[in-house]
Image: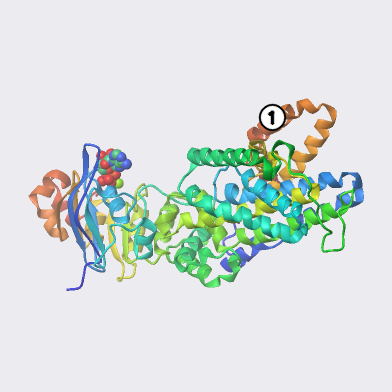
Amino acid sequence: MSAPALATRGLAKSFGSLVVARDIEIELPKGVRYALIGPNGAGKTTLINLMTGMLQPGAGRIFLDDSDITALPPEQRVRRGLVRTYQINSLFPHLTALESITLAVCERTRAARIWWRQLNAYPHEIDEAHDILVALKLGSACHRLTREMAYGQQRLLEIALALATRPKVLLLDEPAAGVPREESQELFAAIAGLSSDITVLFIEHDMELVFRFASRIIVMVGGRVLMQGAPHEIANDPQVRAVYLGNTPAKILHGPRHG
Amino acid sequence: MALSETSIDPQLYLVEQTRWRPAEIVFWLATLLPYLLFPNYLSLASQIAIAALFALSLDLILGYAGIVSLGHAAFFGIGAYTAGLLSKYGWGEPLSGLVVAAFAAGVVGYATSFVICRFRHLALIMLTLGFGLLLAELANSLGWLTGGMDGLQGIHTWKLLGTFPFDLYGRAAYAYALAVLFVLFLFTRRLIHSPFGLSLRGIRENFVRMPAIGAPSRAHIRTIYTIAACIAGVAGALLAQTTETVSLDSLGFERSAEVVVILVLGGAGRLYGGLVGATIYLIARDQFSGIVPQYWYFWIGILLVAVVIFLPNGILGGLAQFTARWSRK
Ligand SMILES: Nc1ncnc2c1ncn2[C@@H]1O[C@H](COP(=O)(O)OP(=O)(O)O)[C@@H](O)[C@H]1O
Ligand SMILES: [Mg+2]
């Protein structure tokens, strides 16, 4: 079996006396769609911060494609293909959508170091940025300032920024947070349509979306991985039911929740 | 800036950003007016051009990359003393003097940029302020070299290009300062429309997001801080060469504060903000201080408060907003 795209070994983190990650052991095989679920405050966002280097772990190691990246700064992890999005939009308000994505593409191709040539000497970068926007149905908004875009479009721009770095492993922190239900379906359809070379881990609270789009699920509670497995295993696990799903797993698995 | 039309080809859009606008051409033609209309004010015009260049260098770090500095005069002063000393000790050729001054300021800028790139916000303000004060005190205590409080005397600037002497009326001086300003403006304009310039705006807009798209923000900041130091050094050298004296206030706190005021007045992050700000600030100072010199700071205080309250994006920002509203009607 080939090495996992991303793995953690004994990852731990505390904020003072609050333990937010405790001996986290995760392996994401290449190309798999993973969901990370758990109640608010379970430590899901913190886990993404640890894996991407935005936070330093108290203990443990992180492996990308079998190489230890624990000591690498965030931007170098991105360069190696480990990329995240944010639960709360973190965009460039006064750049247009096209400028934002062109910026990310230029950073990847290292054109961003060039200060003696104007952007119009980089048609490939601009075209690529435009293609990414079109693929996410943002083509018509590409000249709009980010802060003037609709909220749902901004959520898509979050993903577009990540895609512009050509990720191997993509960590999506509640990509549909705050997005109306119909739009979040579309958003997840776009995620499902990503190249199967990309390994995706997404955090999502809507169980219908989780069970529809994830092939594996990790359940976190109180900074600990409670369980990981295939959707039907998770849905039928009494422990998971007790702490997270409530008592309606069958309904979640077999039909829309708000029906 | 952002267009509401959705059908514009992305390539064309970015080309359009770099196109010269009629207002820009008018602006640069207007810089020649002092020769025709105000021949008695050419030395003021040179001072404006020098202050504009200095403010332009600050715009690169403050307006584009969001790095607030209260010690930018350090580089202005290093450039001024370098050009002054070079001339005093026998080499008064102006253009090579500029190059050496830019280099000296750039070396110090590069060295300090390693500290600068690690801090943001208030820490950065204190750091640049402290660094500026440190250098001013150093220049003061090295009286044997800098002339201390008396200023650096004995500077003689050779003929420009070996042909044009610096005359009493400041004709050559203004042409020189204006030409250098224009060339470095072209350089800066190109830089902010480069991929690197886009990254600087990214750093200003969202410093935290930059690493998450794989951007080496610190390296970017080191580069722009060094470039801005070089340009500030050239501005200082211009002052030394055209006035043939350098005083301690060329690197003092007041000059650092003044250039921030000039840039905020004109509008930071707009390329022309420093140029417009310098023009208005220096003409206003000239006029007001002619009437009642001791009240100058009173008026500049009022002007600053008014601009910040009514035109938070500076004079150019207000103008842009006004024209946008007007063209929509
Ligand atoms: N920087 C921080 N300092 C202190 N506590 C934090 C910090 N970030 C998160 N926490 C706490 O850690 C816990 C886990 O947070 P988080 O990872 O955001 O949870 P989730 O994303 O699963 O909702 C929460 O109790 C939160 O208050
Ligand atoms: Mg979270």
Question: Disc 1 marks which amino acid?
Answer: Gly
Colour mode of the rendering: rainbow
- Closer to the camera, A25 or A163? A25
- Residue found farthest to the front: B144
Rendered-image quadrant of the N terminus of chain B: bottom right
User: Which residue is the site of mark 1?
Assistant: B301
The quadrant where residue A136 appears: bottom left
Q: Position of residue A84 (x, y in %)?
A: 35, 57
Label 1: few (<14), some (14–19) or many (≥20) C-alpha neighbours in 10 Å: few
Mark 1 falls on what kind of element? helix
Q: Residue at x 13, y 59 (%)?
A: A232
Q: Position of residue B210 (x, y in %)?
A: 44, 54
- Closer to the camera, A123 or B201? B201
Q: Residue at x 78, y 36 (%)?
A: B284
Q: Residue at x 67, y 55 (%)?
A: B101
Mark 1 belongs to which subunit? B
Left or right of A97 on screen, residue A117: right
Q: Tally the marks.
A: 1
Left or right of A1 on screen, residue A86: right
